[in-house]
Amino acid sequence: MSTRISRHAALQPLLALLAALAPAAAAHAPHDVVTEAAISPTFAQDHTLLAAFTFTDHLLVGRSVDGGASWQKYGLPMLAHDVTGFAFSPQFAQDGIAFAATGGGGVWRTKNAGLDWKPALGGLPSLTVLGVAVSPDFATDGVVLAATEGGCARSTDGGRSWTTITAGLAETTLHVVVFAPDSADDVIIAGKVVQTSSDRGLTWTSHAAFPDPVETLAVSRHYGADGTAMLAFGRFGNGTRLTTNGCLSFAASDAGLSDAFVIELAVADDGTTFAATKTAGCFRAAAPGAPWELAINGFEELSDQTSNHNTEALVSPDFGRDRTAFIGAFEGLYITTDGGDSWRECNIYSQMLNRHVFFSPDYAHDRTIFCGNYGGGVYEYTDLPAPGAPGGPGSPAGSLAPPSGGAPVLGPPAGGLPGTDRGSAQIDAHDPLPQVPRWHGRSNNIAALFSDALALSPAFASDRTMFYGYTVLCRSKDAGLHWTPLVKPANVTVTRRIATSPAYASDHTVIFGSGGQGVYRSLNGGDSFTQLELPPAFDTSSIDFSPGFAADRTVFMSSRNLGVYRSTDGGTAWLPVNAGLLNLEVRSFVVSPDFVADRTAFAGTVGDGVFVTKNAGASWAPSNAGLPGTAPPAGGPLIIENIICSPAFGSDHTVFASALNDSMFRSVDGGLTWTPAGAGLPKDALRTFDVSPAFAQDRTLAAGTYGWVWITRDAGASWSRLPGGMRVDEGHPTVFHGGLWAKNGSVNNNGAFVLSSVTAGDWEEFTFFGDRIVWYANTGTTSGIAAVSLDGETPASVDLYRPTPAVQEPVFERRYAQPGWHVIRVLSTGTANPASLLPVVSTDGFFYEF
């Protein structure tokens, strides 16, 4: 995360001679929000953390097995509901068991250290579970307790079944439950009343009562002996309370606490106590009840996109020895290894959130695939030669076999592997090495790389036109090599979808929809837009034109809140066409390529699957035969994320649908029945896919998941992963900075700016999993010398001076024999070639392959 970029030209007067600084920017976007996190009780052996993340509208579970240095992130069925807490088996290093509580989906259990999760729901009094706790004697007693909105649930068989406990309970809406670490008999549970049990949760005794519910509770590691615990009220404020007599009484303990909204508490083995608070950050006390002190050295500037910032406080079970703790926040995950004196951010943001995958309309000839990545912008991939040509279909030589779950194996680098520094050699698009299929960044002058909308002109083969949008709206007329910002209506915050008319070459019609801020049309290729008469709250999910639009003027819009609307006059007048839809939360929509003749369209909903119309939307009927069930424990709601027809639908009757947590399905009878078509795909998190324009001949589809882009050349019978590649801009949340870097706008640079430094010691750092890394920089007559190192090795000196200036020059590269976790660090030395006028280091990010 670029958290310490200078925004004041006065700090670096020499840079003011080179470029004007960009306007001040709010703290980072996109988000890497940590909503829940937990640390393994055997952290010293397994180095494991579990966390729930929110990346914009991507809900992910993350697992780190190297103490937070790297993360595996994946979508799961349980993420249909917010994760409200994690709890580990005390023998986690041996049994791999942990539990997750969810606010509406009950309790889930993993038996393989967090890779897979299954529902553990039998007998729960409520599926709204706000806390879960595991007995210290779990290996022998199998006891798990859950705090739910329907009371306390108790399991004695490791979560397989539950019994509702009522004996002595004063209330049914419970928020937290905690076992004493040193006594399996002693448990605390709380809502508005704090209650204790001395028989592992069978019976309860009431103690203190409060006006607001207790939302966090931390106990001394020696609670069974000293009776010490602290509680706080989270979003309700009111500071903290301390007990030293086993919850018989509580007293305020707020000395030094300047933020009364304490969201999470943690007590270490040596008594050091941490509090994560709503806005102030982290407070630390020498012991429960001791005065608090603010400990936020290294915390990021607060984002202006929330008022709720710090959410989690975790301490290592061996804190007295390793001094390690974590604070989870809207801004990321912070780690300290010196007891809280200083913090740094863990690299948790995913560089690989693929929101859109599109084939070029001329794919049969140009073999081009485009990807819109949230946080990375636009990418272009030149696919393998057409079937039958030399080097035909199949994974490129040297590509990785998909590991289990479709994600890289975790772990820190095994050591320095031999690599090659290529200095200033021209690489990437002009690599002199033998060409292999490779992704290339296509985001020059796109000021916001957080793609939510991408569209190609139907006449792409001749006009090379593309549209891109999120917080900005851009157009390219050279297949993404350069982008021009378009004038977006001032009231529109984000662009959700963009679509071009099938007759774009002649009518220049473009429509884009926002997230409840209007739908807009251009009749001049995006030069100007006018608002269309749709409900103001219309939250656009899809836009699709009739293939006969030039004559029938029909276009459809679907939304996440108001169902489907249709226009038959080119978009001027609209009417809802929702008769028969059981759910107006429509996630995806497509019209038949033979719509003029068959009047068929498909809608994918959240919770009720696929609906089909054969009369242009006048009526709809469900069409889910063969799709997964929608009731627990089947895995949560059936969310049809994307649905696309074969271009030859009129003859092959083929349509594909992706379910958010259930992979891909295919119908060959026009949607009447569905069969799985995702062999080889990871089951979870399939966000986008596209069908080749030449599908009748090549049987090819491409799909994007959280981590990769995949391809099938047999209509979904089998899938393989494309080589991975990612251009990571210097402003990306995964790139960290220290020092006085200045932000300089530039239309010729990736992401529309570069960061520059003339100060010795300013650094930039990026952690990646891959087998190739490239650093890009601007070079010229005022450029200095940088020191570049990988994995802490001796830095290589990279001279950026050139008599002829260049932008986005690949100035450093390293290749590895095998993919692994690596860290690249760029250091500004404050020195320069004698021929250079200034020692400027201007960085434009990285490209890595995996």
Image (spheres, helix red, strand yellow):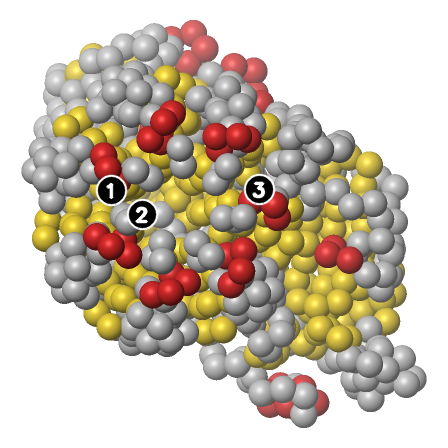
Q: Which residue is mark 3?
A: 364
Q: Please, is residue 232 above or below residue 280 in the view?
A: above
Give the residue at mark 1: 596
Give the mark nearest the N terminus, 2 or 3.
3
The quarter of the rendered structure image containing the C terminus is: top right
Q: Secondary structure at mark 2?
A: loop
Q: What is the crowding at mark 1: few (fewer than 14 residues within 10 Å), some, or many (at least 20)? A: some
For disc 2, the marked residue is 547
Q: Is residue 704 left or right of residue 312?
A: right
Mark 3: give few (<14), some (14-19) or many (20+) Cα within 10 Å: some
Q: Residue furthest left?
A: 579
Residues at marks 2 and 3, CA–CA distance in whole angstroms? 20 Å
Q: Say if residue 557 shows up in the picture.
A: no
Tag 3: amino acid: Ala
Instruction: Work out whether 555 lies above or below 652.
Output: below
Depth order, front residue of 86/672: 672
Per the image, label 1 sits on a secondary structure element best described as helix
Query: Residue drawn 68% across and 29% down?
Result: 388
Which image quarter: residue 784?
bottom right
Question: Do the CB atoms of the residues marked 1 and 2 lie less than 8 Å apart?
Answer: yes
